[in-house]
Image (tube, rainbow, N blue to C red):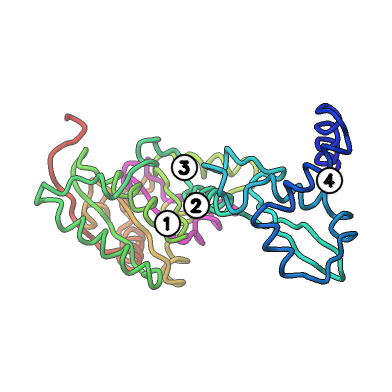
Amino acid sequence: MKPVQSTLRKWMENNGNFQENYIKIKQDILQDPEIKEFLSLYPELTDADIEKNLIKLYEFKNQSKQCNACKSFGTCINMIQGYSPILEVNGGEIHLSYEKCHNRIDEENKRRQQKLVQSLYMPKEILEASLGDIDSRDPQRNEAIRELIHFVEESKSGLPSKGIYFFGPFGVGKTYFLGALANKLKELNISSSLIYMPEFVREMKSSLKDDSINEKIDFFKKADVLMLDDIGAEMQSSWFRDEILGSILQYRMMEGLPVFFTSNYNLAQLEDHLASTRSGIETVKAGRIIERIRQVSKEVKLFGNNRRDQ
């Protein structure tokens, strides 16, 4: 409280007679409507009690209460940013404490929500995507939009066990759908991890050098909602397919955790792609991955105009 005391004393000393100013400030404090109401609740407080705690009353009077004098968290005028003063009486002593104000709570919620969307090599425009900005005029997109909205609605009462496997040609907005969904889910305090598959493969390979691969795999296994963008575009290897992708999908299938995918391939085409490796054609292992994908997602086509040309 020293800053308040020194500020008050300096003001009085710089404005004429000290005693005269002290009386004026005391009257001003005691005439404050909130302080008058507070003191009326405790008639047992004597003039000496009030005099002894005058500095606390002064501090209370000159601060914003629950944002009534602050336009935003960044423009908070209080001694402790984002905290509102509260007066209490305990054992005949006036106490001044602080609680979080509305603006601070809102700011903390926004920061926490921002952390709910984790991305690996996703462009900024995707991270800023919004469901409201999705073009619904093209009837070829109706099914995909309907399934996306259905997932959001179900998530309000509990996270569904299946995501969506969006497939379609280049440029129709598949990745944008993932970003828009991730931003909508964070409003429900549901975390998402968005991963661009070609870079994800490189990330996993480089993780072998610093022994961080198991930690990263564990993170993607347990994310509330996992989103794998452009599956099938990565350089195919049996190691990544079986040890990384297979492990993640197996865990999420067993735990009932949803996965979203985007791909230029439908599931039958993706199975052929996954089967072809340097070791030859591995139909059984590819089929195992496809079966896991079917367990954690629903195949939905997404067609329409190429938006990259617009």
- Reply above or below: 149 against 57: below
**Which mark is nearer the camera, 3 or 4?**
4
Residue drawn at (40%, 72%), measured in percent from left and top? 158
Residue 69 is left or right of residue 260, and the answer is right
Between 191 and 165, which is closer to the camera in this rendering? 191
Q: Distance between the Cα atoms at labels 3 and 2?
A: 17 Å
Task: Tell me which amino acid carries mark 3.
Answer: Leu
Task: Tell me which amino acid carries mark 4.
Answer: Met
**Do the numbered discs 3 and 1 sit on residues whose CB atoms are within 8 Å?**
no
Q: Earlier in the sequence, mark 4 or mark 2?
A: 4
Q: Is residue 77 magenta?
A: no
- Residue under pointer 4: 1
Between 205 and 282, which is closer to the camera in this rendering? 205
Placement of the N terminus among the 4 image quadrants? top right
Q: Earlier in the sequence, mark 3 or mark 2?
A: 2
- Neighbourhood count class around disc 3 (C-alpha, 10 Å): few under 14, some 14–19, many 20 upward: some
Residue at disc 2, secondary structure: helix
Q: Is residue 222 magenta?
A: yes
**Which mark is nearer the camera, 3 or 2?**
2
Choose top left, top right, bottom left or bottom right for residue 78: top right
Residue at disc 1, secondary structure: loop
The circle drawn on residue 113 is: 2
**Do the numbered discs 1 and 2 sit on residues whose CB atoms are within 8 Å?**
yes
Q: Earlier in the sequence, mark 1 or mark 2?
A: 2
Q: Distance between the Cα atoms at labels 1 and 4?
A: 39 Å
- Reply above or below: 7 against 105: above
- Residue under pointer 3: 120
